[in-house]
Image (cartoon, rainbow, N blue to C red):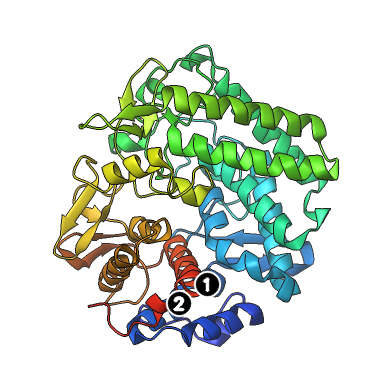
Amino acid sequence: MGYRETQRRSADKRLFSSPAVEHLLQDIKKKIANSTLAEIFENCFPNTLDTTVYYDKNNNDTFVITGDINAMWLRDSTNQVMPYIRLINDDPELKHMLYGVIKRQAKSILIDTYANAFMRDTNSRSDWANDNTLMLPGVWERKYELDSLAAFLKLSSRVYHVAKESAIFTKEWRDAFKAVIETINREQQLSDISASPYRFQRKDYEPVDTMLHQMGTPIKKCGLVRSAFRPSDDTSTYQFHIPANAMMLTELQSIAEILLSLNIETDTAQKALKIAGEIERAIYKYGVTRDLNGNPIFAYEVDGFGNVLKMDDSNIPSLLSLPYLGFVKKDDPLYLNTRRFVLSDENPYFFKGSAGEGIGGAHIGINYIWPMSVTMRALTSTDDQEIIECLRILIKSCSTHKFMHESFHKDNPANFTREWFAWANSLFGELIIELANTRPHILAMVSFG
């Protein structure tokens, strides 16, 4: 792919270039006093465009790989292009490229609403073709994750709110939207786990990569929507994933309001609002538990029977990211309790070492911190010192390559996974842009040592 470890890909080898992105990059870079932070931003912010976007202008189709995996995740592709949406009215080609991502996502959903990742064409063979599930042509991986469907809605609504063009809501998009609502309604109304048509099993892999008896642990109908797998692509312990449900209800409300205002698919939009209301009530009834000190906090997963999993994972949506998702405000008391919990040793996946502290997850395992969780901590913080500490950790975590990684060992940042992970790079870009707009005095600091 021509990826270069220590610097941005040269201009002649970039897959997509945007004058608006380049202008914003240079404008913000001038505001960053720390040269290392500026270099990391210059590498990370355009990384998705430079290395992962395959744009077919003639067919208005855009396929976005994750980086070192040559497949497109619904979740990742949305998050990878998120920082560019603000610029689409300044760059028509960038706008149409993003329209192409929405088109590709709709096309993918119409292949299979239960799949999380897709291939560029239907003739390729997936690495997971032997999974015991319904693998259709074009599917890379078939892990049913609620947030994947929410990501499609999020990208569509965010692009519309900036562009104000209803052209993105094509017949194909409307069919995909109806398929999403049909699927989540089905997975919300299950009488028991066996009533779902979804089955999945992967043999000879870690337990986090497969499902018990192809169906997972039992659930009880309660208003929440089932998610067989987490945003990390790990199997859910209890299949009502609270952050994914929070994200889904937020995006259902957002897209439904748009469609109703445009008089598009009004019946389905009304159904979406109904489901969103049911999810919200269920989160506060079934998805709230208590920490060891008796303080109310959001649970990570529940099953509707009263069982709860108290933890947080680095992948987004997470409990830490609830304000970023638009579900709660940063100063919400229940969120603040939850935030204290997930950033403490009560969270089994919160790690602290000589290289820094942050949240990891089962996907990589014990003692590995994910930069995305550190970035999200900064994005959801209201405290300058906390944000500065997050920047210090992020700089240290990528001191060798000047790109964000998937994870790094809490005591050794040189021990990391995935040197090419575009989502983490884009999220870091979002953070720096947010600081430039709201806390420029932090970027004006010379030292983060």
In the image, residue 20 sits, relative to residue 304, either above or below, namely: below
Q: Which residue lies furthest to the right in this view?
A: 263
Q: Is residue 78 left or right of residue 311?
A: right
Q: In this view, does 19 lie to the left or right of 359?
A: right
Task: Please give the label number shown on residue 437.
Answer: 1
The reply to whether residue 290 is in sight is yes
Mark 1, secondary structure of its residue: helix
In depth, the one of 156 and 446 nearer the eye is: 446
Give the amino acid at mark 1.
Asn
Task: Please give the label number shown on residue 41.
Answer: none
Crowd rating for badge 2 (residues with CA inside 10 Å; few <14, some 14–19, many 20+): some
Q: Residue 210, how many percent across, how many down?
A: 36, 33
Give the amino acid at mark 2.
Pro
Please name the residue shown 32% across and 85% down the image: 446
In depth, the one of 234 and 440 nearer the eye is: 440
In the image, residue 79 sits, relative to residue 268, either above or below, namely: below
Query: Label 1, label 2: how many angstroms apart (C-alpha)?
Result: 6 Å
Task: Please give the label number shown on residue 440.
Answer: 2
Mark 2, secondary structure of its residue: helix
Crowd rating for badge 1 (residues with CA inside 10 Å; few <14, some 14–19, many 20+): few
Callout 1–callout 2 Cβ contact below 8 Å: yes
